[in-house]
Amino acid sequence: MQRHAPFVLRWIALAAGCMPWAAVAQEPPVTALAEAATPTAPMADLPPDVTDANAMTLAVSLVGRITGQYNSGFRIDPAGNTSTAGVEYSSRIRVRADAETQEGDHRWSVVGSINVDAIDGTLSGGPDAGMGDKLPGTAADSVVLQDAYIGAKYGKLFGFRVGAMTSHWGLGLVANDGANGLSLERNDWFTLTRAADRNLRAMVHAMPWANCEGSALRGLMFIAAVDKVLDDDTASSVDGQNAEQVVGAVRMHLAEKRWFGLYYVRRWQHHDMNATWNPGKDLRVHVVDAAMDLDWRDKETRKGLRVEAEAAGILGDTSLSPTPEYPRHDVQQLGAFGRLTYVGVAGTGLTLQLDSGYFSGDANVDDGKVTTFHADRNLRQGLLLFDRVLAWQTGRARRTASDPTLVGVPAQDLDRLASGGAVFDAITVYPKVGYKLLDWLEIYGGALLAWAPAPLVDPLSTRIFGGGQPINFAGQKADGRYLATEIDLGARATWHLGEPWKAAVQVGLEQGILLPGGALGTLTSSDNTDNHAYATRLTVSLLGR
């Protein structure tokens, strides 16, 4: 005997004017809050006979990479110190298992997932962590639990999950699962991601009109969650930073790969009195984020057009980084990012891609407002400008501002100046082009152009040396708003493994050179013709399909 839907779900379906047992559309992934936008494909499937009662599907994956990167040295503070130069070795290995029951003709099923990143970060060659905060190459984790949840769903009408989960929304401007670079589907050029935003979460999702064939509301999805934050860009439970949030999202699916939606977060963050950083401080913000993904590429050949865009505003208040005049600051931040991709131009193996973004800055740290927007650390732009040069310079800012020869008592919460490699205070334009020389060999390149909407400001240098005029993190007065030109080139070879292994081996070589503009200033300790930074990266990856 077939089980009936819960009363409330049947009522919703009938109220929409459709029968609850009608055929349903292909279910879109629950990506707004629950899991990767494109989960890493399994290395090997263990498919059951799904016509059997109490059958279960199980997908297991093993993916990862190992990277060697040579980095040049460049100026990082007003004293003329330079960053650590040399080769850094890093890795990331991910093991994932997803299970789902299929109870014959019954619509209820149980779902579960466990997802672990191992040896995630720099293995050797990185700088001494004492040189600054959140410096590139200093972070490494032996084991990071990404997902460990269980739940149930009733067809496509309703479902819930409880446990540890990663978050992702849109392009990953605010919530990012860090899965780029672990599958062929999400294999961006010049991108090296790390562990994701992670939460202890209770979540529900519903598509009330999923059974209404022909209904305009058939693809409408609602998602809600309550979180205890484990780790993200602004909080870590390890350091006594207690963050909680309620989350809601609405998505309208026009097709499996085409949707638009709205994402909302109300976040409370409190730092314990015995925390290492910012003891007793708090943060209270609202986040509103609109995103869309319109993918018209062919499912098999991947040729066609894809348009992605996301814009987020953050409003609230905080007692972090107080001043005598402003013990609390208003938070007013704005960020936007878009990507246009066209594959198969004129019937060739040519791919054209254009990234563009706006990330608000803050030229005045003493006006009672915090307006610098930091994108999620896993939304990467290029190899050098944000990921290394500005990460180093902002990471040194606390040590510079704590120099006892310059200040008696340093300002509070200076560790928050460190960007950790995130894109911030920038307007970026990043055109890229790729070409497949062979089925297994691709070459590609791009030019990242960046401007600062607000002058880069090192608070201490601006107060002491600038007389109120903005001084950047290298101790120099800005000459205009142009940050830098970064030229990136790359090549990668990909070999697909045969069945039953749904995976590929990829070897990539990438090179970047950064030519600083007037806002960034000279990158050398003396004025000479070698005013640039560069990096060379070799990566060997095992990717899911």
Image (cartoon, rainbow, N blue to C red):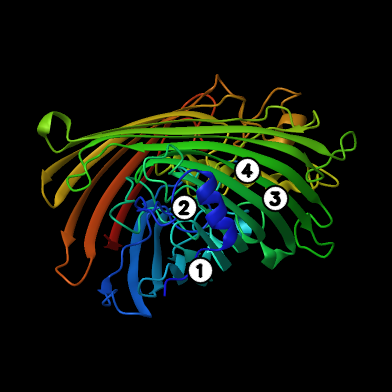
* Mark with earlier residue (4, 3): 4
Q: Is residue 367 left or right of residue 129?
A: right
Q: Which residue is mark 4?
A: 264
- Label 4 with label 3: CB-CB less than 8 Å: no
Q: Which residue is mark 2?
A: 31
Q: Quadrant of the C terminus?
A: bottom left
Where disc 4 sits, the SS reads strand
Seen in the picture, residue 57 relative to 404 is either above or below; the reply is below
| Mark 1 crowd level (few <14, some 14–19, many ≥20, 10 Å Cα) | some
Residue 5 drawn at (x, y percent): 51, 63
| Quadrant housing residue 361 | top right
Q: Amino acid under label 1?
A: Ala
Where disc 1 sits, the SS reads strand
Q: Which residue is mark 1?
A: 152
Looking at the rendered image, the disc whose residue lies closer to the viewer, 2 or 3, is: 2
How far apart are labels 2 and 3 at the CA level? 32 Å
Where disc 2 sits, the SS reads loop
Q: Is residue 501 left or right of residue 158?
A: left
* Mark with earlier residue (2, 1): 2
Name the residue rendered at 22%, 62% in the picture. 504
Which residue, as the protein is rendered here, is positioned at the far right? 324
Seen in the picture, residue 360 relative to 194 is either above or below; the reply is above
Looking at the rendered image, the disc whose residue lies closer to the viewer, 4 or 3, is: 4
* Mark with earlier residue (2, 4): 2
Frontmost residue, 344 versus 515 = 344
Q: Which residue is mark 3?
A: 415
How far apart are labels 2 and 4 at the CA level? 14 Å
How far apart are labels 4 and 3 at the CA level? 27 Å
Looking at the rendered image, the disc whose residue lies closer to the viewer, 2 or 1, is: 1
| Mark 3 crowd level (few <14, some 14–19, many ≥20, 10 Å Cα) | some
Where disc 3 sits, the SS reads helix
